[in-house]
Amino acid sequence: MEGVEFGTDYINSWLTAWQRNLLYAQDPGQGEARRIWARVAFSALDGAERAGYLTRNANVSRFNLRALLIADLGPGEDPLWDPDRLASDVLAVLPLNLEQAVDWAVDWRTRPGDEILALRTCKNLLAPMKLIIDQLAEGPARAEIYRWLNLWPQLP
């Protein structure tokens, strides 16, 4: 039991560091320095993951911050701030393919808990794409994101 408590405390200390740096990364008064604060926040989030924080939760947080900074500051030369790279990263970690999500979304209330969680995870991961959809280059990734965002309201 001590190991579990230590793990939780360790995760929480990393998440506290994430939250503190996130405040600066979201502060418009920080200007371009927001990208630096975001990188520090991402490092803390990486530490929380190594300590046992769920990757799906970390990805949701990471993608939301990336989309916010892309929307507010525009793309940068760094691939981290490239909207198309973010779209690819989101698509790569979705736990379901689009066809499966369409099938499951129809009757999601009757689905087992793990399937509902997979649908909910898709919705959470896709939310930041709503901020930057207009910044994506024409192509397969943008088309796929559009299809997912059309399904988004039907996801739990």
Image (cartoon, rainbow, N blue to C red):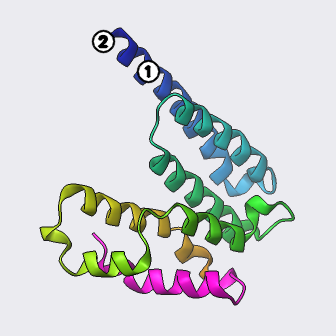
Position of residue 13 relative to residue 66, above or below, is above
Q: Earlier in the sequence, mark 2 or mark 1?
A: 2
**Secondary structure found at label 2:** loop
The residue lying at 69 percent from left, 48 percent from top is: 38
Q: Residues within 10 Å of mark 2 (few under 14, many from 20)?
A: few
Q: Left of 45 or right of it: where is 30?
A: right
Position in image of residue 19 (x %, y %): 55, 39
Amino acid marked by disc 2: Met
Q: Which residue is mark 1?
A: 7
Position in image of residue 66 (x %, y %): 65, 60
Amino acid marked by disc 1: Gly
Q: Residues within 10 Å of mark 1 (few under 14, many from 20)?
A: some
Q: Quadrant of residue 65?
A: bottom right
Residue 127 visible to an observer of this rendering:
no
Q: CA distance from mark 2 to mark 1?
A: 10 Å
Q: Quadrant of residue 95?
A: bottom left
**Furthest residue toward right:** 77
The residue lying at 50 percent from left, 55 percent from top is: 60
Q: Left of 55 or right of it: where is 141?
A: right
- Find the magenta span and give its range: 134-156
Position in image of residue 76 (x %, y %): 83, 65
Q: Which residue is mark 2?
A: 1
